Amino acid sequence: MAISKVAIVGAGVMGEAMIHALIRSGLASSEIIIREKRIDRVEELVKNYGVKSGSLESAQAIILAVKPQDFEETLEEVLPELEEEVLLISILAGIQSSRIEMILGEKVRVVRVMSNSPLLVGAGMSAISVGKSAKLEDVSWVENLFAASGATLVVNEELMDAVTATSGSGPAYFFGFVEAMIEGAVQLGLDEGDAKILATQTLIGAAKMVSDSGKNAKTLRENVTSPKGTTAAALSVFSSHNWHEIVYKAMTAAKEKAIELSQLRHD
């Protein structure tokens, strides 16, 4: 599918990540249009990336990256500018394709994507599901777009809330864990700069082992946990606080919030 001009509606963290993804996929920055209410933010992105700001009428694909609470108002605002059968890619947590289709009707083909902020560094995880009017070539184009900035996975839309709780919100879980490791290392006497290097590289190396070793996470954990050793002592503290249950409860809370967002109505 030949798409040469793309608009991004919403220019927050994920909107900016989508600029990176589009450029990595080979689209010229001059062919990217942004729509954002904050004038200072528009000026910043135009200056930093060479993108344009203006009407959406010439865009062949629209990436919807506003807050879920604002999506209905936003869609009603941009509807007059949309070309017939434009491809709309929604990256909104909790908002089902059917709700977008209800507002825009047959004027658009909807593909829903749950991605995450590591798109900014070319290491995103993007799950893709398909609206009822989307075509195979739409899905292929979206897969290629997001694959240029990480990994992709096509799933049934009914699983998207679980995806949100896993990879959508997931980076923050790891950021929080690294933050806690750095704080702990400093309390143990390490310099903060050294602690950051140690914790960060440990996370990178561990992730690479999960990705590349061919072994599952449980096996890798067992392989580095000598009986009665230092790692076993640390893990016993986590286990005493039932950390698997804590992680599950946290992910369940994220999923339930996504479901709550899907039920919001614009007044």
Image (spheres, helix red, strand yellow):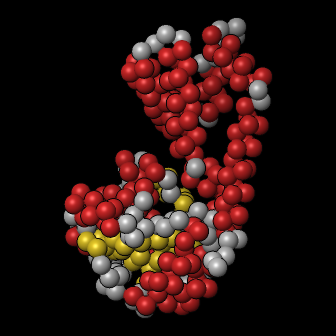
Residue under the image location 67 percent in, 52 percent down: 254
Q: Is residue 214 visible?
A: no
Residue under the image location 44 percent in, 28 percent down: 200
For residue 217, what is the image quadrant? top right
Q: Is residue 127 visible?
A: yes
Q: Where is residue 64 in the image (x, y as percent from the top left)?
A: 47, 71
**Foreground residue, 122 or 196?**
196
**Foreground residue, 158 or 102?**
102
Residue under the image location 50 percent in, 34 percent down: 207
Q: In this view, does 172 lie above or below 144?
A: above
In the displayed structure image, the side of residue 148 where residue 30 appears, left or right:
left
Q: In this view, does 220 lie above or below 126?
A: above
Task: Pick the quarter of the image with the N terminus.
Answer: bottom left
Residue under the image location 46 percent in, 87 percent down: 79
Q: Where is residue 96 in the image (x, y as percent from the top left)?
A: 63, 72
**Foreground residue, 133 or 169?**
169
